[in-house]
Amino acid sequence: MVEPPTETAADIAAGYAFSAAALELGSVVLDGAAYPSHRVRIPLSMLTRHGLIAGATGTGKTKTLQLLAEQLSAAGVPVVAADIKGDLSGLASPAQPAQPGDRVSARAGDTGDDWQPTGFPVEFLALGGLGSGVPVRATMTSFGPLLMAKILDLNETQESSLALIFHYADSAGLPLLDLKDLRALIQYLTSEEGQDALAGIGGLSKATAGVILRSLITLENNGGEAFFGEPEWEPADLIRTDEAGRGVISALELSAVQDKPRLFSTFLMWLLAELFSELPEVGDLDKPKLVFFFDEAHLLFSDASKAFLEQLTQTVRLIRSKGIGIFFVTQVPADVPDSVLGQLGNRVQHALRAFTPDDASDLAKAVRTYPKTAHYELTELLTQLGIGEAVVTVLSERGAPTPVAWTRLRAPRSLMAQLDPADQAQAVAGSPLLAKYGASIDRESAYEKLAARLEPDEPAAQPEEPEAGQKPAGRAGPADRTPADSPQPGAGGAVADVLGSTAFKSFARSAATVLGREITRSLFGTAKRRRRR
């Protein structure tokens, strides 16, 4: 006996009938027909088990992100979302409310949604101030060598040399705030004055230093100097609610840096690493403290070093205990390494294409990531999903995967288009964060300190000529030296040359002034202790 579709839809929806608060995704679909009373949902408490939103271009991934961000905000959960093309600006749409149309009304009927146009609190941010949002910057010291190596596309040998450079800067009290600081330090460490400073801990070859310097110059010529400096972004400013208790959505505008994908993807990872470093352990919560949407996630993993992937995997695994959920947004699950993919408990898979052998391979891999289902033939279904439809499975309240559900997703309640630029500019001008981060600061750092160190010393004052029969004041003659002052047998040679070198004396002076102040670093080599200004 064939089970009636309504009974099958009810069986699937029973797996999503959670008792606690949940986000509404949409309704169950069978044979192309939606069942509005049978809902598909995600428990708020399970969002810290992370998730994946995948699908080919134009299948509705951004609208799914928008739908989730709206409901998280309404539940009092702050959101951080990368806005690659400016499509998420419509979230802040009271000035341009979304308008109900035939398509929205039809979708509301299919999903049992009492749809009402709504705007949400949005903080517009811009990486390095390239755009209309509040500038987001990082200091080089805080960014760390591992993330910097990712931006510069360094190999493992060059990455380890960069880590050595950062170690020297940390221990010698040389703040690396912007690109010119790092460039000046590398030039110093390969100069006659500084070339011996790292000799005891591995050294820095001029060839490797040359590669790093050329990469830094290329980054600077491409506008990279705008992203590094002060004031540095504080993680606490991403976790805010408005007067009504709704979570603030921090939309990081990246349209001005679309041509620098490695830079903005790594910068997003820095924000996540900073949150991990700063937030306390909280364990399991009824709802997350923050949800982070990582758009164009394949850029993060592409050509990443082994060390980078290891730290990324560890961050994803451990950050749940800080109350943070992460959703990776990309085209196919294969874009995400298995070590990370295995930690993503919530899946929203939009349509996939199978035009090439590689596409077919990606499709087969995607099907294998889903629980077994007797209700759908996934290989066929994933190529036939309509826009705004997805195959969904999430973690239930007890942590078990829910039944696979072909889902017709609800329509976002905010504007599904870009906000008018004048309205966005007005929102940025009224931001309480603009006074804190709007103007850049250039205080004394490694560049200035090294420049001062390499300046020639002032000529010493000539001592007055002593009167006849007197020894020069302050100088001991041979007869006045104590045994400790006298040259000892075996002294001199290489040791004396090192101890007497200008580079060693310069390093010793720096080390003495910062004794006990070496920066400790956490995951990704980011600075563990923030330097308050």
Image (cartoon, helix red, strand yellow):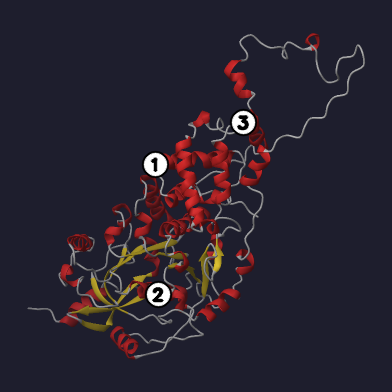
The secondary structure type at the circle numbered 2 is: helix
Where is residue 438, by image quadrant?
bottom right
Q: Position of residue 495 (x, y in %)?
A: 59, 19
Assess whether mark 1 and mark 2 are in contact (beta carbons under 8 angstroms).
no
- Which residue corresponds to the image point at 50% horizontal and 53% vertical from the top-left? 277
The secondary structure type at the circle numbered 3 is: helix
Q: What amino acid does circle 3 point to? A: Ala
On residue 472, which mark appears?
none
Q: What amino acid does circle 1 point to? A: Glu
Where 377 sits versus 336, above or below? below
Q: Residues within 10 Å of mark 2 (few under 14, many from 20)?
A: many
Direction right: furthest residue: 467
The residue labelled by disc 2 is 66
Q: Residues within 10 Å of mark 3 (few under 14, many from 20)?
A: some
Q: Position of residue 430 (x, y in %)?
A: 60, 76
The residue labelled by disc 3 is 503
Asked if residue 175 lies left or right of residue 117, the reply is right
Where 33 sits versus 256, above or below? below
- The mark nearer the N terminus, 2 or 3, is 2
- Which residue corresponds to the image point at 78% horizontal and 10% vertical from the top-left? 478
Q: Position of residue 449 (x, y in %)?
A: 65, 43
On residue 156, which mark appears?
1
Assess whether mark 3 and mark 1 are in contact (beta carbons under 8 angstroms).
no
Where 323 sits versus 523, above or below? below
Q: What amino acid does circle 2 point to? A: Gln
- The mark nearer the N terminus, 1 or 3, is 1
Q: Rounded to the nearest whole Å, what is the CA distance between mark 1 and mark 3?
A: 28 Å
Assess whether mark 3 and mark 2 are in contact (beta carbons under 8 angstroms).
no
- Which residue corresponds to the image point at 53% horizontal and 48% vertical from the top-left? 527
Residue in front for this viewpoint, 116 or 446? 446
